[in-house]
Image (cartoon, rainbow, N blue to C red):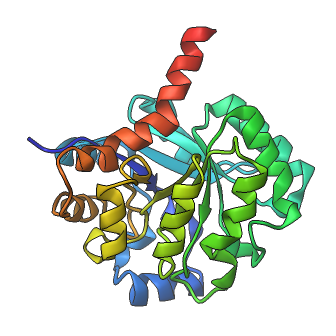
Amino acid sequence: MSPRAIDCWVNVNMGAMGRPAYLEEVAANYFKQGEDFFRDYSVSEMVETMDRIGVEKAILTTDAMRPSEHVLSFATERPDRFALGCQIDPTLGMQAVRALERFSRDHDAVLCRITPFYLDIAPNDAIYYPIYTKCVELDLPITINTGIPGPPAPGECQHPMLLDKVCLHFPELKLVMAHGADPWWGEACRLMLKYHNLYMMTSAYLPKYFPPELISFMNTRGQNKIMFASDHPAIQMERCLDEATALDLRPGVLDKFLYENANDLFFAAKRSAGKDR
């Protein structure tokens, strides 16, 4: 029987982004991808793939201030299979805070995303704090990219240690390190032990390249901390899932990695909130 899975990072509108030079470079030289990287995907196409390989849900992301109608259509047509997150630019101040609140209300968002390398501003900078505060108020998890990015862009701002004081000052904030943490896996795992609400998703990182310290962490004290994500089509969903199922994990850990941890963080709380209303 195929394992069940939730894919926490899926892109369906890469075609709409055009072909900027940095994307051309990262597609060809980092992800080794061809034309499938630069196109939009349809709802039926994604559902067929997900049905075939056992992915129950996928989380899609769009800009909170200028949402993509194409991305929104997935959650409208198949809310049972697709959930939405929103990308935020914290440099926009209260405009960003209001956009986050509006998007969360209008589209039942399951997460917020910030990508530090786009800004070259470390996530412990005060400019992020209004977004963190609003995420706590909304009980909305936030993902922050960590590790050296694939594109030729600043990497120092994505060191996991820059989240240390964020977690310290915002203990209620549910924070997910995204795209792994290469090459700072040890620091990332140690921080997850330190902070109850700090997690990681392994988007944009092939499971066959997971370092031994991450596998050890997943098998022991980090069983509830790590979540599966592909960053499809940067890494095709099917290939990423195939490699994940081949990992040397203890009984029960694979299901936590592929499904339970994401379900608990992004979906279980929403179901409970709905019952309380």
Most foreground residue, 120 or 237: 120
Q: Is residue 94 above or below residue 118?
A: above
Find the residue positioned furthest to the left. 1
Q: Is residue 41 above or below residue 101?
A: below
Residue 154 percent coordinates (x, y): 67, 85
Find the residue positioned furthest to the right. 94
What residue is shown at x 42% (from left), y 63% (from top)?
Answer: 202
What residue is shown at x 21% (from left), y 65% (from top)?
Answer: 243
Q: Is residue 31 visible?
A: yes
What residue is shown at x 15% (from left), y 63% (from top)?
Answer: 246
Q: Is residue 57 visible?
A: no
Residue 150 percent coordinates (x, y): 51, 82
Most foreground residue, 91 or 213: 213
Within the image, what quadrant is residue 273 found in? top right
- Position of 224 with respect to 140 (left or right) is left
Residue 56 percent coordinates (x, y): 31, 38
Within the image, what quadrant is residue 37 found in? bottom left
- Position of the N terminus, as image quadrant, is top left
